[in-house]
Every structure is written in C-alpha cells, then in structure tokens.
C-alpha cells in the first residue's frame, strides 16, 4: 500500500471519529469505537514515521505535505480547521487514546476562540498545533498591504536563483526575526535535512550495490561455465560481428577472441571453418531458428573431423533478431563410435544368420522324414523350428534396421506384375495363417496395373503387414489383401494396396506411434507372439524409399487397415496420367466392380455391423 493511500485511510478514520464525537458524547460506544479505530491507524503510521503533519492549505487537507484526493468528509475537516483558525496539527509517536479524544473534542468546539488558546499542550505532549496569523488590513492600510504582497512576490522570485542551502537559510531568516533563535533553528533544519538526505542516499545506493554485486556474481558464474564448456560457443550480433568466443570455439576457429571481437566472424576463416559457420552467416533468419547439421572438415594435417553446428537466434523483447548463438561440437568420436556399433551389429548378425539358417533347414528336413519320429518328438522339433524361424526374423530385422540407420539400404526397381506378386505373398504367409486358424483372402482385379518396385523388398513389406495382421487377429478371424485403386500424387501415379484384418484394433492415440522403432501396440492378451518392434519401422522406410507412403486406420476391437501406395510401371502410369482423373477414376471403379465381397464384409465389420 502506498503512503498516499495510507494517509487517505487515516484521514477517513479521523473525519469519521470527528463526526461521531460531534453527534454523540465521547463516552458513547459508537464514539469510543470510532476514536479507537482512528488511534490504531494513526499509531500504525507513526511506527514508521517520527511525526504526522495534517495541514489545511487553501481549504485542502495535506498529510505530510502530500495532497490527497477528495475523500468525501475532508471538506468538513478543512472547515473545522478554518473555524478554529488552525493551520496544522502534528501528531507525534507515542500519542495516547486520551490525547486524541481531547483533540477531537476541541475540533468540535464552536470556534469562538482559537484552538491555540484553549489547547492544553502540557496535557497533550504528543500533539502540536499551529494557528493561522492574519494581518488586519484595515489597520495597516491599503498601501501597506500592497507593499507586503509586492515584497513577498519579489522575495519568492529571488529564491529560484539560490542554491538549496541558500534557499533554506533565506527562508529561516525571513521566518525567525531573532538572530539567536535563527542560528539554532537553521542548524536544526540543516542537520535534519542532511541526515535524511544521507539516509536516502545510503538506502538507494545500498540496493544498487546489492544489485551490482548480484550481477557481477552472475556474470562471473556464466563466464566460468562458458569458458569450461567442452563445445565451442560463438555469439555474433545481427551484423555478424563477434561478441564472444569461448576457448573451445577459439580452437575450432583457429583464432583468439581478442583478435576477433567486434570483427565480422567470417574474416580470415579457412574453408573448413566457413563451411561450419555457413548456417550462422548466410541463413534466412526470418524462417526461424537455424537447424543443426553435421559438417566434415579437414585440418592442416589432413585429419577429418565431424563438427555439429547448432544455432539459436537471439531476439529482443519485440521479437527482433539481434544476434545468433552458435554451438560447435566436435562429434568425431561419437560418429566413430556409432559407425563401430553399426559394424559390430552387422558383423554379429551376419555371423548368426548362417548357423540359424542351417539349423532351420536341418529341423525342416528332420520333420520331413516319413518315419522314425514319435508325436512328442515331432512336437518338440516343431517348437524348435518355430523359435528358429523367429530368431531368423529377428536377425533379418536387425540387419535391415542397421542398413536403414546407416543409410545403406538400396532398392532396385523393376517392372513387376501385380497379380502374381500378391499371389506369391499370400502363398508365403498362408502356412502362418493356417496355423492360427485364420482365413486368408486375396482381392484383386483380373488385370491390375503393373508396379515399378523392388520385388523382394515389396514382398517383405506385405509379409510384414500380413504377419502383424495375423498376429493380432484371433482364431476364426479374417485377414486379406486387396487393390484399392490408383491416385496421383507429387507428379506420379501410385497403386494403392490395402491389408485388412478383423483383429483387436488399436486406440486412436496409438496410431501415431506404431511406426516408431521398438514400439508395439495392440490389445494385451490378443496374441502370445512377440516381435522386435522394428517391422513397421522397416516397412515404412522401404515404402518411402520407393517414393510412396503408408497410412493406417484402426478401430479398437474391430480391426485395422494398412494402405500402401507404390509407384506403378512408367507406361501404365503415363497411360493413366494422360487420361487425367477420369482414367484414375475408371481404374478405381473397375477395382470396385471386380471385388469378390471381401472389402464389403470388412467395411461392415469395421462399422460394427
């Protein structure tokens, strides 16, 4: 709460108490409560002040020299001051409830005599009153009055040219006629003034010193952190001039801060350093923060290093770009460790693949023998074969993921007949579907357009999707694959092939996660089979390497639909494109007309019918 607000609250309490003691006797409960409330508020103010001065200046009430807003009853208080010829009253710390009650009683008197004549200073030592003195202009005469006014105006005008000390001295000399009193009062005023000024300066500078110390400590702490960083840190302003470089940044740039500060960051840089800082220097900053990237540079000794440059824009409060903060990290060791990890995984999985394939083939041969095996033996060998096949799939997934992660997976596109390809996929996956008691259906037109794909990778895509569909579909369920139609996208024509199931489905919030690596979603308990969580990640990557896309729709408890878009054979694509949307629509219609009922049954199931 500000001082002015506190003064206004006190003034309200004082006028309220004056009104109650005027209306009732001072011993009346209403008066006593009102006076006690006013005394409590006054005592609270005097806890922080040595005195409280309430003055009447031209009919307006000032508290400690602060003019207050009109608070309703202040006019009545000003009227009482005028009636009693009272200029001001000073309340001192330690004022009692009785002293305040006596003062309020005098405020409510008839005013026939000045309050100074009736006020008992001895009985109220904590209240000082000052009367208004008037000149009787009738006795002094008009000329004397005019002369006094003119003299006062000249004196007031002369004050503006004086120093503060001179102004105080002049005011005291004019107010105190006796020389012996004048010196004493002047010393008292100046002593009090200097004391309060010194206190205010100490208070203000004390806070400033604390803030300065805190800022210096923060600055020192930040400089230690920046200097000790293992990454190179560079800050430039909006013109590209260097503001700060830490020791690691000096090593990366091959220059010291004292030689670079306030100079353009690109001055004197070698080719390698220019490549690293290119995003900082030449990026279009209106597009937002500059993305991090890795750059391979060679030093003077022809040693290759990989540096990761990450840049963040520095903006002012209005959002304007005022500089760039760059972090240069030497990630050579991390990249080398990553390469060693990929090589190790590839080497181990390659070494595992040969004995696993041999074991799988041996188990298949043994199970194929016509005699000599009992039912228990066949059961144990079947379990061993299934687990060997699972291990083989795991090894293949890890190898494929390693290729994708290193960017070494390649596809070899060729013209592929769609119908035979789908039949081959169905034949490949049929034993798994039969073992699970699931009906497997194929839905395709008699002569669908040809695909322009990597045949083996395309088989892998649909085997992965169908395996997942079977995995999450209960016995007596249905899984199918069918051609949906064609669509144009990004300047190409793509054939859409869908894999549908009547399995457990997925929650809507899980759909965005299913293509992440090592993520498996589905109803718990839907299947005892488990995988690596890499199948859909690899599937999506293979489809995108073809320039296509994959999307999913799913309804919890009713099933899922994965739709894959793959590029068509160029001649077929040109034929459809030249005919525009009409030919694509006719192909889509033909796909719909030749359906054997599978898609309709799936749609009914997905709608909950």
Image (tube, rainbow, N blue to C red):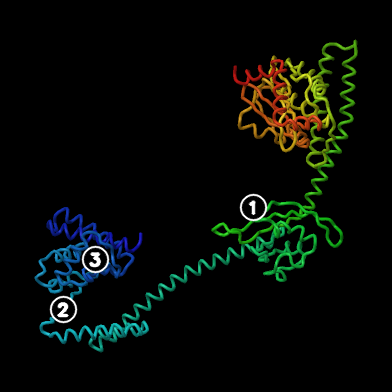
Observer-side mark, 3 or 1, equals 1
Q: How many other residues sit within 10 Å of disc 2, few (<14), some (14-19) or many (≥20)?
A: few
Could you tell whether 17 is left or right of 400 in the image?
left
Residue placed most toward the observer, 402 or 358: 402
Residue placed most toward the observer, 530 or 74: 74
Q: Which residue is mark 1?
A: 287
Q: Secondary structure at mark 3?
A: loop
CA–CA distance between discs 2 and 1?
A: 77 Å
Indicate the quadrant containing the N terminus: top left, top right, bottom left or bottom right.
bottom left
State the image coordinates of residue 591 (x, y, percent, origin top left). 72, 21
Could you tell whether 383 is left or right of 195 in the image?
right
Of label 3 and label 1, which has the lower sequence position?
3
Observer-side mark, 2 or 1, equals 1
Of label 2 and label 1, which has the lower sequence position?
2
Q: How many other residues sit within 10 Å of disc 3, few (<14), some (14-19) or many (≥20)?
A: some
Residue placed most toward the observer, 435 or 95: 435
Q: Which residue is mark 3?
A: 95
Task: Inspect this view and state whether residue 498 appears.
Answer: no
Q: How many other residues sit within 10 Å of disc 1, few (<14), some (14-19) or many (≥20)?
A: few
Indicate the quadrant containing the C terminus: top left, top right, bottom left or bottom right.
top right
Mark 3 vs 1: CB contact within 8 A: no
On screen, residue 110 above or below 153: above
State the image coordinates of residue 47 (x, y, percent, origin top left). 32, 64
Farthest bottom residue? 179
Q: Which residue is mark 2?
A: 134
Which label belongs to residue 450?
none
Asked where in the image residue 494 lies, by quadrant, the reply is top right
Q: Secondary structure at mark 1?
A: helix
Q: Secondary structure at mark 2?
A: loop
């Amino acid at each position: 709460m500000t001082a002015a607000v506190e003064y206004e609250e006190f003034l309200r309490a004082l006028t309220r108490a004056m009104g109650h003691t005027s209306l009732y006797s001072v011993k009346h409960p209403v008066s006593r409560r009102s006076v006690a409330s006013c005394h409590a508020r006054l005592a609270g103010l005097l806890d922080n002040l040595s005195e409280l001065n309430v003055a009447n200046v031209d009919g307006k009430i000032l508290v400690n020299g602060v003019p207050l807003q009109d608070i309703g009853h202040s006019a009545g208080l000003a009227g009482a001051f005028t009636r009693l010829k009272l200029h001001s009253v000073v309340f001192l710390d330690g004022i009692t409830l009785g002293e305040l009650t006596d003062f309020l009683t005098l405020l409510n008197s008839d005013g026939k005599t000045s309050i100074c004549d009736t006020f008992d200073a001895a009985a109220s030592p904590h209240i000082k009153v000052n009367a208004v003195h008037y000149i009787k202009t009738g006795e002094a005469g008009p000329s004397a009055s005019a002369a006094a006014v003119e003299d006062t105006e000249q004196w007031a005008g002369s004050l503006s040219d004086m120093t503060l000390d001179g102004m105080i001295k002049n005011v005291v000399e004019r107010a105190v006629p006796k020389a012996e009193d004048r010196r004493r009062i002047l010393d008292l005023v100046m002593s009090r003034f200097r004391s309060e000024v010194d206190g205010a300066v100490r208070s203000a500078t004390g806070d400033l010193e604390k803030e300065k110390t805190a800022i210096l400590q923060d600055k020192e702490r930040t400089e230690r952190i920046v200097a000790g960083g293992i990454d190179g840190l560079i800050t430039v302003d909006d013109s590209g001039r260097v503001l700060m470089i830490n020791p690691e940044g000096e090593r990366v740039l091959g220059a010291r801060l004292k030689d670079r500060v306030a100079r353009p960051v690109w001055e004197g840089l070698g080719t390698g350093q220019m490549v690293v800082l290119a995003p900082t220097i030449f990026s279009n900053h209106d597009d937002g923060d500059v993305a991090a990237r890795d750059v391979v540079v060679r030093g003077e000794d022809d040693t290759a290093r990989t540096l990761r440059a990450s840049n963040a824009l520095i903006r002012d409060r209005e959002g304007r770009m005022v500089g760039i903060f760059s972090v240069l990290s030497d990630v050579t060791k991390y990249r080398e460790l990553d390469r060693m990890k990929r090589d190790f995984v590839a080497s181990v999985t390659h070494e595992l693949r040969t004995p696993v394939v041999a074991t799988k083939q041996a188990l298949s041969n043994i199970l194929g023998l016509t005699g000599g095996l009992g039912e228990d033996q066949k059961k144990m060998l079947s379990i061993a074969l299934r687990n060997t096949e699972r291990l083989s799939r795991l090894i293949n997934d890890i190898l494929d993921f390693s290729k994708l992660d290193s960017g070494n997976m390649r596809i070899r596109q060729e013209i592929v007949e769609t119908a035979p390809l789908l039949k081959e996929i169905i034949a490949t996956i049929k034993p798994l579907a039969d073992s699970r008691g699931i009906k497997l259906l194929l839905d395709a037109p008699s002569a669908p357009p040809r695909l322009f794909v990597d045949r083996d990778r395309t088989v892998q895509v649909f085997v992965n999707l169908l395996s997942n569909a079977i995995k999450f579909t209960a016995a007596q369920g249905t899984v199918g694959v069918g051609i949906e139609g064609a669509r144009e996208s990004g300047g190409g024509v793509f054939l859409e092939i869908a894999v549908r199931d009547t399995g457990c489905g997925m929650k809507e919030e899980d759909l965005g996660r299913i293509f992440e690596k090592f993520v498996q979603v589905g109803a718990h308990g839907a299947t005892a089979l488990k995988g690596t969580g890499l199948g859909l990640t690899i599937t999506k990557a293979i489809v995108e390497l073809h320039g296509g896309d994959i999307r999913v729709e799913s309804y919890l408890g009713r099933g899922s639909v994965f739709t894959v878009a793959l590029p068509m054979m160029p001649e077929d694509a040109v034929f459809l494109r030249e005919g525009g949307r009409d030919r694509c629509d006719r192909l889509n219609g033909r796909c719909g007309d030749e359906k054997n009922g599978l898609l309709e049954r799936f749609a009914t199931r997905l709608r909950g019918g």
